[in-house]
Structure formats: C-alpha cells, structure tokens
Image (cartoon, rainbow, N blue to C red):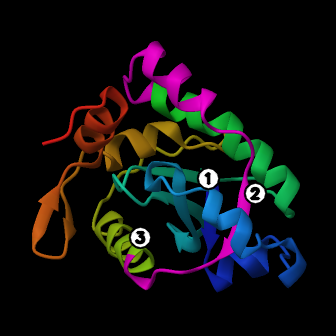
Amino acid sequence: MIIYCSKALQTALKLSKTDFATPEQLATEDNSFYVWHGHIVKVDGRNTIVLMNDKTMYSMLFRNKLPRNKDKFAELVIEALPYTFEVGNINREEIVNYMSNVDNVIFAEKADRQITGNITRMILDMGYRWEYAWREDETIQAYEAYVQNRRLRKIGKDYVVPFEDMLKALCGIHE
C-alpha cells in the first residue's frame, strides 16, 4: 500500500527524503486500488488528516491525538482501513480480501496534484455543514467518513459517489 503525502503531511509526520519509497518499490505497486493520497488540513478548527483512495475517491479521516511519526501513522492506517470499511457497511469478506493484499505501508512524495485538489474540494464541501459526526474520543473518524463517502464528488466533468465506486472495486464489478 502506497501513501503519497502532501508537503503539509510530510511536515506533520516529520518525513525526510530517506523515508520515501524508491522508484523500484513504487514500480511493484501497480494497482491504483491500493494507492492513497494523504493531506492534513484544518477542519472545524482542528488538524485533520484525510486519506483518499486514488481509484475510488473513498476517504478516511483522522482527528484527535494525531500520530507524529510515520511508523505510528502506518499502524493507525492499517487499523483504520477495516474499521472504516466496517462502519461504511462493507461486507466482511470484501474487507478481508482487501486487507490480505495490503502488506505494509510505503510513503512516497506526492505525485498527483489532482487528488490533492479533490481532497481540498471535499474539505470545502465539509465546511458548508453545520453539524459534524466527529467523535472527540476517537482518532479514526469512521462515522464522519461514512457521511462524506456517500456524497457526490466531482472528478473532472464526472460526478461519483465514492462508496459505490469502492463497492464495485471490492466486488470486482467494472462497468
């Protein structure tokens, strides 16, 4: 699993050039279904880490007691994936299938500005809401992610619902 980090997330996790994957490591991970982009922004007055899947735009949100280094963040992501999927009403079989293909977390420098733009657009859309489903005692904000993943998102000229795209990808259904 590859996580492309924005400059802000690199700074927050104190990542250096030696922490990033080599081109050989990146070449082994050719499936965009296991590639995520990460960014850290202020939402509702607090730092929030957003991870967005490259293929489906499915996102995970982290807030409260954020990790300060890459190892703890990698552990948190591995813990958050099945939990966020479970809260999002994805079948256990698909969760186990996805997690069986996730070996370890590799960090890389941001390669695609479009995904960061999509994350920013999602954050701007979140800013127009009065109520959030934040859980102040949890770092993994699966319930707010549940709400966000069921909203329409714009990719270029198309509109998608990330939850539906993730289900199709997990079940192997391609249009």
Q: Which of labels 1 and 3 is toward the front?
A: 3
x 45%, y 37%: residue: 143
Residue matched to label 3: 119
Residue 112 included in the magenta stretch of the image: yes
Front one among 116 and 94: 94
> What is the CA distance from the residue labelled 1 to the residue labelled 2?
7 Å
The x, y position of residue 141, in whole percent, is 55, 43
> What is the CA distance from the residue labelled 3 to the residue labelled 2?
18 Å
Q: In what element is the residue under mark 1? A: strand
Marks 1/2 in contact by CB < 8 Å: the verdict is yes
Q: Which residues are magenta?
A: 87-114
Residue matched to label 2: 66
Is residue 50 left or right of 161 when viewed as pictured? right
Q: Amino acid at mark 1?
A: Phe
Say which label, 3 or 2, has the lower sequence index.
2
> What is the CA distance from the residue labelled 1 to the residue labelled 3?
14 Å
Front one among 119 and 45: 119
Q: In what element is the residue under mark 3? A: helix
